[in-house]
Structures are given as structure tokens and as C-alpha cells.
Amino acid sequence: MTSDAPRGVDAPPELVQLLTPEGERVEHPDYDIELTDEEVRSLYRDLVLVRRIDLEAVALQRQGELGIWASLLGQEAAQIGSGRALTDADMAFPTYREHGVAWCRDVDPVRLLGLFRGVNHGGWDPAEHNFHLYTIVIGSQTLHAVGYAMGIQRDGAEAATIAYFGDGATSQGDVNESFIWASVFNAPVVFFCQNNQWAISEPLEKQSKIPLYKRASGFGFPGVRVDGNDVFACLAVTRKALQNAREGQGPTLIEAYTYRMGAHTTSDDPTRYRVADELEAWKLKDPIERLKAYLFKNQLADQEFFDKVDAEADALGKDVRRRCLELPDPEPEALFQHVYAAQHSLLDEERDQYLTYLAGFER
């Protein structure tokens, strides 16, 4: 990387890549993947639909219909690739940005919007989808994932967990503690770090002096850096790491080297801390465009296919918007439901006080 190049743009030499930004298929000695033509087209459809959901959610927030939204723009390949590597038995532990993984786990997108609209407590049953609730506290889900993985281990089940987090979370104590526990107990867990270059407004070099994937060696398990904008590579690397975990080989840290093309959340202004040239350079690595180029070059899809996917995306966007706006406001006492598994006297007292307070207003 030259001194005048936008930061983070040049691909690190140790990057696992199976599909170049130009849409050329390349081989890797340690990671191979065999996909049917239909599976490749399905991956493209996933990428496009998930981006459309994300763009609709950003628009809804800008129009005052959501309180906040954390965009995944630019990170679709990392999420779809890793999400499609999961089996039905595996359990995923997300942050608040894994809308693509939620899509892979058949979580209704409107359930996600309900959380950010403030009309539900999380929106879905984790056990139904093997997809845990979104975690706002940075890094805490990694400990949950390790604990769940240790339970899998003791049950003797053929499954694994995957914990998602960003580059900024690697500075959190919870993440490092989860590395220790996973290593010592050889837990069947995959740590999936989406290194999107920016922890809100702090660049990666203020988080770590070494590549993030190399941190794993200090805890006693392997780490690998994958091109996070390459859906093939993300699928292959995650699939292998999960299989190793299920076979008793312990944890793996995957660093998906990608880029956050939008704001950290809709309350953030990235133009205050990063230059436009950096964003423009990363647009050339767009995960959707490179897969589209691959499909074209290999005559796996024609214009009719792409038009059909675009039309489906538009229809999905309209449906998500309509159903989001139709979400009913919950009754005030719903705030106190599902906090504890059983009745709790202190919570009952707080609920009664709150309802008494509300009764003093005209409704």
C-alpha cells in the first residue's frame, strides 16, 4: 500500500480470495468450493434482496419511521457467505447489524424493523430460527456464544455456534474473555469479525497494531483473514471453520476484511472522519457487482435474470415498508412482559407504579 493510497483499500497478501473484484474465479490451496449454477444465482439473489431491505430501512429511518438503523451496506457478502455456511443445528449470535444473516436464518425483515421502531422486545424466537436476538452491548454476544457452544459440547450434539462482531469490539474485554474460554475448553465456536475498517469514527490502526486474525494465535487457536466482499470465499472459509468446530477441533477466528460503505448508524456522519476517495476506491470492490460480473462472464445468467431479481427486490422493499408502517404500537404494560421467565414482585411493583403514572394523563 503506497502512502498516498486510500487506507485499507489494497488487499493484504494473506487474504483468502476466490473471486476477484473483477469477477474472476481464482483457486486457493486450502479452500475450495463447488457450487452449482443455481446456487451461485441464489447467492446473488440473497445479496441483492438483503441490500434492498437495508436501503428501505435507511429510508424509513430518515422519514422518522424508525428510531435508528445500523446499515450493512458493503458487508452483504460477509454476512450471506457466512450465513449460508450454517446448518440448521448451528446457532448464530449477532450484533445489531447482521440483517443478512437474519435473512439466511429466515427471520422476517419486518421483525428487525420492529425492534428499531420500538414496538417489540426483540422480535423473534431465537430457538425457532437458531438466531439469537440482536445484541446492542458491544461484544457481549461472544460470551453468550461460547457458553452456548460449551453446552453443545456437553450434550454431544453435532453443531457449532458462530459469534459476529466488528473490529471495534476486539478491544472489548468480553471478546478477549470469550477467546480465553473458547480456547481452554476447546469450544465448538467460530468467531466472525467483520472488519469494516472503522469502529464508529476510529480507524483500525487505533484498535490493533497487528492484523486482527493474528490475535487468535495468542489464545491458542487458528485465525484466518478472508476477503469480506467475496461471497464465495466467505462461504468456503466459514463452512470449513464450522465443520472443524463440530469435529472437536475447537474455535477459529475469521476476520472478514470488508468496508462499511455507509454510516455506522443513521445517527452518524462518516464524512466527518473519512475521505471520499476511500469510499470511492472501495466501491470498486462491491460484493454484488463482482458476483454479477462473474455470472455474466461465465454465461450463468442473462439480463432477464437480473431484471427479475431487481423486480423482486423492489417488490420486497415495498412489502417491507407497508408492513413496517402497519406495525401496531404495543400497550404500555407490554414493556414489563417477558423480562423474567417467572413472576417477579419488584417488576410487578414497577409496572403498577408506571401504569398509575400513565393513568394521570388523558388518553
Image (spheres, rainbow, N blue to C red):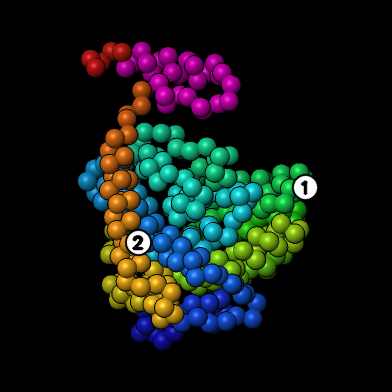
How many C-alpha atoms fall within 10 Å of the one at disc 1: few (<14), some, or many (≥20)? few
Going from N to C along the chain, the mark reached first, 1 or 2, is 1
Secondary structure found at label 2: helix
Residue 164 seen by the camera: yes
Tell me if residue 306 comes above or below residue 165 in the rendering: below
Residue that label 1 marks: 156
Q: CA distance from mark 1 to mark 2?
A: 41 Å
How many C-alpha atoms fall within 10 Å of the one at disc 2: few (<14), some, or many (≥20)? some
Looking at this view, is 183 or 293 the one in front?
Answer: 293
Viewed as shown, does residue 234 lie left or right of 147? Answer: left
Quadrant for the C terminus in the image: top left
Secondary structure found at label 1: loop
Residue at image location 65% in from the left, 77% down from the top: 30
Residue that label 2 marks: 309
Tell me residue 256's x, y (percent): 52, 67
Tell me if residue 13 comes above or below residue 339 in the rendering: below
Q: Amino acid at mark 2?
A: Val
Viewed as shown, does residue 168 lie left or right of 151? Answer: left
Tell me residue 221's x, y (percent): 70, 65
Viewed as shown, does residue 44 lie left or right of 158? Answer: left
Residue 285 seen by the camera: no
Residue at image location 58% in from the left, 39% down from the top: 127
Report the predominant secondary structure element of the magenta stretch: helix
Residue at image location 22% in from the left, 46% down from the top: 63
Residue at image location 61% in from the left, 45% down from the top: 144
| Residue extending furthest toward the bottom | 2
Q: Amino acid at mark 1?
A: Gly
Tell me, yes or no, whether the two marked residues, 1 and 2, touch with CB atoms within 8 Å: no
Looking at this view, is 333 or 100 the one in front?
Answer: 100
